[in-house]
């Protein structure tokens, strides 16, 4: 006969266990710990870029030790020729930094800088923020795209549209037969400009297209005459030529027409690539030094290993010296074997004319 516990007894047992457990002093749950803050990057850490993506962060010293190139693209960067040290400060550095960022302050010191406007041809590249603003200027890019400049392609390669020259006329104060002096020159300026030669209809349309591109860059004065290479047009054209790093002759030559026909975005990205290339070239020496240190460390580690068994301690010494190659004779230095002998021709002797005999 089996004994089966009643359900009441089982329930009473669990109830007593619950009362005993409830008589114990209550324990409070431990407060949740706040999440640990994410480790912030040190101000001196630099991002490591590989394949166009950031793969980590390192300090400048660690990057140079690993053979990486440190690029300084801040607004205060200048080529290495303008670098300074605590012992040898560079007094022109603040002025050149202002030119790189196009910050023309008031005063006569910046008067010439306002006229030049661009300084790439003088060895002062624009800053990264300045190039970023140029690339992001959609209005300027759309203005260049609207210009109908197909006439620039129709000109021949040797065609050069010259700038206008100052007009000279004979001095009316000089009497006929009177010799000119410093006070009374033979020719005087009228204050106007004239073209050295008359422009064709095609060249006139090309000048109008060039002026439209200058307006997109805000380099053309409102008082410039349309279709003429006057003084105001030449000033704006010279600034544009310095921007595109071509000769600022003031003439519409082949290089200038090629720059005008190019895409403005592409030209800005080329300037950005040139800035990165110049910034990396200044740090190339430090990268080479790091590579040399790494190679010397590897060579020291290789020399510390025991030499291999055999006659020669390393493979480099085990190579046999190469025999010097025989010098091949040129085909003209020796005669071929199967060559027929040529008969020698007798030398031509000069025949002297005999004088006739004298009669006695």
Image (tube, rainbow, N blue to C red):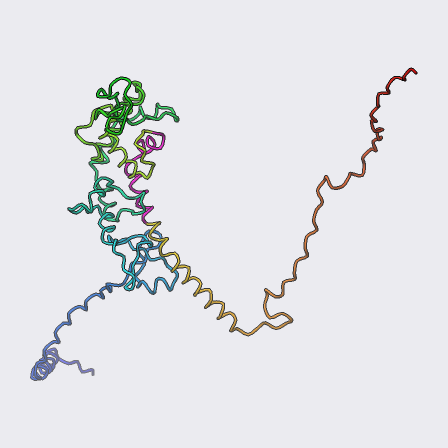
Instruction: Say which residue appears at 25% left-offset and 50% top-offset.
Output: 96
Name above or below for residue 45 compared with residue 3: above
Instruction: Say which residue appears at 49% left-offset and 67% top-offset.
Output: 299
Instruction: Say which residue appears at 28% left-offset and 35% top-offset.
Output: 238
Instruction: Say which residue appears at 30% left-offset and 57% top-offset.
Output: 83
Left or right of 83 in this view: 349: right
Residue 146 in view, yes or no? no
Q: Position of residue 242 (x, y in %)?
A: 29, 39
Name above or below for residue 86 compared with residue 344: below
Q: Is residue 263 magenta?
A: yes
Please state which of residues 165 and 22 is positioned toward the viewer in this rendering: 165
Q: Residue furthest right?
A: 360
Q: Position of residue 288 (x, y in %)?
A: 42, 59
Q: Residue furthest top?
A: 359
Name above or below for residue 30 compared with residue 72: below
Q: Main secondary structure of the magenta part?
A: helix
- In which image quadrant can residue 245 be found? top left
Residue 210 in view, yes or no? yes
Q: Position of residue 161 (x, y in %)?
A: 32, 25
Please state which of residues 98 and 330 is positioned toward the viewer in this rendering: 98
Q: Position of residue 253 (x, y in %)?
A: 34, 29
Q: Quadrant of the C terminus?
A: top right
Please state which of residues 346 and 202 is positioned toward the viewer in this rendering: 346
Please state which of residues 165 and 160 is positioned toward the viewer in this rendering: 165
- In which image quadrant can residue 308 be found? bottom right
Left or right of 102 in this view: 12: left
Q: Is residue 144 magenta?
A: no
Q: How many marks?
A: 0
Q: Quadrant of the N terminus?
A: bottom left
Task: Specify the segment rendered in magenta.
Answer: 253-275
């Amino acid at each position: 006969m089996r004994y089966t516990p009643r359900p009441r007894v089982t329930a009473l047992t669990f109830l007593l266990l619950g009362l005993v457990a409830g008589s114990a002093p209550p324990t409070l749950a431990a407060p949740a710990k706040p999440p640990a803050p994410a480790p912030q990057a040190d101000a001196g850490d630099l991002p490591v870029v590989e394949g166009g993506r950031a793969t980590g962060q390192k300090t400048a010293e660690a990057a140079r030790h690993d053979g990486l190139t440190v690029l300084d693209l801040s607004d205060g960067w200048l080529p290495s020729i303008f670098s300074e040290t605590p012992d040898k400060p560079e007094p022109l550095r603040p002025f050149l930094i202002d030119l790189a960022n196009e910050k023309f302050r008031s005063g006569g010191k910046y008067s010439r800088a306002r006229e030049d406007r661009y300084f790439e041809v003088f060895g002062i590249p624009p800053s990264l923020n300045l190039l970023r603003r140029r690339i992001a200027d959609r209005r300027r890019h759309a203005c260049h795209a609207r210009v109908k400049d197909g006439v620039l392609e129709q000109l021949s390669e040797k065609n050069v549209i010259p700038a206008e020259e100052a007009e000279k006329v004979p001095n009316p104060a000089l009497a006929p037969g009177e010799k000119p002096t410093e006070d009374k020159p033979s020719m005087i300026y009228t204050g106007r400009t004239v073209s050295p030669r008359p422009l064709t209809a095609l060249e006139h349309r090309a000048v109008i297209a060039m002026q439209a591109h200058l307006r997109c860059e805000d380099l053309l004065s409102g008082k410039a005459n349309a279709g003429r290479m006057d003084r105001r047009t030449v000033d704006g054209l010279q600034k544009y030529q310095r921007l595109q790093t071509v000769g600022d002759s003031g003439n519409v030559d082949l290089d200038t027409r090629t720059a005008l026909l190019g895409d403005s975005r592409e030209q800005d990205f080329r300037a950005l690539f040139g800035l990165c290339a110049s910034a990396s070239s200044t740090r190339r020496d430090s990268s080479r030094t790091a590579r040399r240190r790494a190679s010397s460390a590897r060579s020291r580690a290789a020399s510390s290993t025991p030499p291999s068994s055999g006659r020669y301690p390393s493979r480099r010494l085990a190579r046999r010296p190469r025999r010097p190659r025989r010098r091949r004779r040129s085909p003209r230095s020796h005669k071929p074997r199967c060559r027929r002998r040529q008969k020698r021709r007798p030398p031509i002797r000069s025949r002297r004319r005999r004088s006739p005999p004298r009669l006695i």
